Amino acid sequence: MNAKQLLTVGSVAFDAIETPFGKSDKIIGGAGTYISWAASFFNRNQGLISVVGEDFPMDELELMQRNGVDITGIQIPKGGKTFFWSGRYHNDMNSRHTLLTELNVLGEFEPVVPEKFKLAPFLMLGNLSPEVQRSVVEQMATRPLLIAMDTMNFWMDIALDALHNTIEIVDVMILNEEEARQLTKEYSLWKAAKTIQSMGPKTVIIKKGEHGALLFHEHRIFSAPALPLEEVFDPTGAGDCFAGGFMGYISSSNEITYEVLKNAVIAGSAVASFCVEKFGTQRLREIAPQDIHQRMKEFYQLSQFEILDYGTN
Ligand code: AMP
């Protein structure tokens, strides 16, 4: 694999999750964790910038290293406690309710980009405060080839101006449909994407949960299907896996063309489809790059068809 360096900033966390199918204990989670895991199926030349407490298991960080994720940028403040998040899904699994957010070490987090990552050509800004996201971009020695960001409605509610200041410096904005509507006040996803493009990013990806994703690139649109799955056990991390798979795929490609972006959307969708099959990161620990490749083929077969002659000629 000849992948170029991919740098991610994102939370590394303990999560506790309740779904209609069961309840997890405190398990490993965090947007940065999911992004790095997902990207590692395509790229083992990664760096992760984050913060954990002294209570975070070292073997998890070592496992990340073995997955090709350099953890030099993960701070471990003395006596600190790891960020903790817990959430509950309802029957349709589309709506999630946050039960508890304990920021702990994430509350004081000031990311520091180590020298060896300052020239990274690919940068993924996981869902964190827009100031933290921007500070990572500002610490880079050269402007990365591609910067993507994720966000959530929480930042639109409490830090809208700062969010705009970050959106205007990125190339790819990844968000879900409710967030796109809230950010732009447009119901039509087409109009919402155009409005976000006018804020800065040339490429906008709107995720529609179990209904797939839309890629808006300059004036073109690509619709990625969602694979109907037999098992949907826990949607936590699906959005981050999408982003990680997307950036992992692009950073391992030779160039960034529209075709590569389309494939990257399918790569992200494929990783996300595995992620939801079990609690937390469990399913990601069981699969290999060939499983992702096989699933990308299933995505292809799902929506590929030929228009047959039907008596018009
Ligand atoms: P997703 O399901 O893709 O939205 O991401 C879920 C992950 O986001 C969980 O593993 C949480 O630990 C993490 N998370 C939840 N809230 C926050 C937050 N305010 N800041 C950073 N990470 C968060």
Image: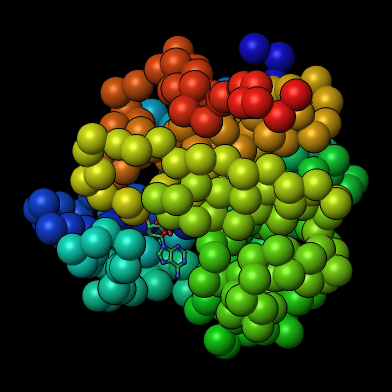
Quadrant assignment for ligand 1:
bottom left
User: Is residue 289 placed above or below 187 in the rendered structure?
Assistant: above
Q: State how many labels appear.
A: 0
**188 or 73, which lies in front?**
188
Q: What residue is drawn where x is 34% and y is 38%? A: 228
Residue 8 shows in the view: no
| Quadrant in the picture for the N terminus | top right
How is the model colour-coded? Answer: rainbow
Residue pictured at 24% horizontal, 75% vertical: 99
Q: Residue at x 31, y 68 (%)?
A: 96
Residue 208, relative to residue 71: is it above or below?
A: below
**Left or right of residue 100: residue 226:** right
Q: Residue at x 30, y 36 (%)?
A: 229
Nearest the eye: 180 or 186? 186
On the image, the x and y values in percent for residue 116 come to 74, 36
Residue 232, how many percent across, how many down? 25, 44
Q: Is residue 194 positioned above or below 289 on the image?
A: below
In this rendering, position of residue 275 left or right of residue 198: left
- Does residue 226 lie above or below 185 as drawn? above
Relative image position of residue 49 (x, y in whole percent): 58, 49
| Rendering coords of residue 176 (x, y %) | 53, 62
Does residue 195 appear to the left or right of 246 in the view shown?
A: right
Q: In the rendered image, which quarter contains the C terminus?
A: top right
